[in-house]
Amino acid sequence: MSITRRTMLKNSVGMGLGMMMSTSAYERAGGGSRGQDADEPAAVPSPEPRIARFERMAFGMFVHWGLYSQIGAGEWAKHMQGIATDEYMKLMKTFTAADFDGRTLARLAKRAGMKYITHTSRHHDGFSLYDTRGLSKYDVINTPAGRDLILDFVEGCRVEGIVPMLYCTTLDWTDPRFSSDFPAYLQYLRDSVEILCTNYGPIGGFWFDGNWSRRDADWEEDALYAVIRKHQPEAMIINNTGIGSGGKVGHPEIDSVTFERGRPEPLDRSGWSKYVAGEMCHTMNFHWGIAVNDFNYLSPAHVIEELCLCRRAGANLLMNIGPTATGGIPEYEAAALKRVGDWIVLHGGENCPLYRGRPCGISGQEHDFALEMDGEVFLFVFNLTSTSNTQAHGDARGPGPRTFTGVNRQFSRAIWMDNDEELTVENDPDNRRLVLHATRYPYGTNTVVRIARLVP
């Protein structure tokens, strides 16, 4: 994962700036003109089953963990501190993974309402959390842990009903072939991915990161993605375009665009040859691996807002945690995510419209929006109090009328999902508009974002 925006601006190594692609690649992926008549609306393709399943999962956990976790200064510690590879790899001698348990991690995700986990298999430092079968000496089998932690992870996920996905770096700071013999390095990368494809059962997706480090290079993506399609045809293929390049469409095999720490906007898929999903990855502070002196954590309220606003755009939220040096789950992240899970339970649990609800052309004021699920429409209402907006504590719009446009049918009333209170609505069919009369929170309640179900 690329480092934070403010650090990135201080460096010129191309971190997270997104890989650029040719116009022809963009058009093959579905982002270019189709030469249609100007008066003929362009069709939106239907998502392939794996992409539709991915969108319904809505909320996932990102996990960044590796040797750098022992330093406790973020996942880029080797690069930022200028640590030589021989010195850095001495951390393998103390990598015990004593507190890592894939099932415990999956239980937290499940408790938080998350449906999948994307876990680092190898990060930019070149250290692998799985048995590389001799491809690299820098793997977990050669540490005191002595066990395949990716196997532990995927098995734990399956027991808890969580979909396992794997983060795979394409950038490597420790393999000399990355600089001296790039084709040989890319073969090593493909061989590594083939191991992950063939030894761990069904994998929900592969999340690549690092192409932005060599924007003009030929990454031989056809060959890389062919390995996945051969062995894991139902796996999502995602390649992070990084900070500043959110929503960029890449290779035609890509199944989802990324928005690294950037709030997504709806994708206009009109005329595309393939339906591509969207996913925003975000982290609880300013680092992806654990950073013991980073106190700038998001609140549960902030995570709830980001999750809702991702779904407003039809995108998933991939929320990161950084386990401890020994693989334990930090207390703050665990508590915050559980609180988000409580919010989801309050709004229907498995039937929360965040999962299967889709944008339906209805727009609200400011952040307010609507999703449609099984023929029902749900209104998401923000800023009922001055503390709802976690990014700016100022005056709130408060209770009162909220206008929604693009409404093509009439409704008799609305019902808050958190307490079943009935609300008044006004229909304006001539202008395809509806006004919801939002009531205030009961004393002792503030759900940050409140959901109302419209009743015909």
Image (cartoon, rainbow, N blue to C red):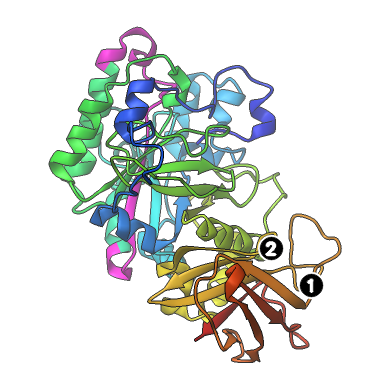
| Residue 237 picture location, percent across and down | 31, 42
Q: Is residue 292 above or below residue 304?
A: above
Closer-to-camera residue (160/207):
207
- The residue lying at 38 percent from left, 21 percent from top is 23
Disc 1: CA contacts within 10 A as few (<14), some (14-19) or many (>=20): many
| Residue 152 picture location, percent across and down | 30, 55
Q: Quadrant of residue 291?
A: top right
- The residue lying at 55 percent from left, 31 percent from top is 76
Closer-to-camera residue (122/344):
344
Contact between marks 2 and 1 (CB within 8 A): the answer is no
Q: Quadrant of residue 32?
A: top left
Amino acid type, mark 1: Thr
Q: Quadrant of residue 453?
A: bottom right
Using the rendered image of the protein, determine whether residue 38 is visible from the camera's viewpoint: yes
| Residue 263 picture location, percent across and down | 59, 48
Q: Is residue 178 magenta?
A: yes
| Residue 72 picture location, percent across and down | 60, 41
**Residue range highlighted in magenta:** 158-184
Q: Secondary structure at mark 1?
A: loop
Q: Is residue 177 magenta?
A: yes
Amino acid type, mark 2: Gln
Using the rendered image of the protein, determine whether residue 113 is visible from the camera's viewpoint: no
- Which residue in the rendered view is the most extreme toward the right? 395
Q: Is residue 25 above or below residue 360?
A: above
Q: Is residue 7 above or below residue 69?
A: above
Q: Earlier in the sequence, mark 2 or mark 1?
A: 2
Q: Which residue is mark 2?
A: 365
- The residue lying at 38 percent from left, 76 percent from top is 374
Q: Secondary structure at mark 2?
A: loop
Numbered badge on residue 385: 1
Disc 2: CA contacts within 10 A as few (<14), some (14-19) or many (>=20): few
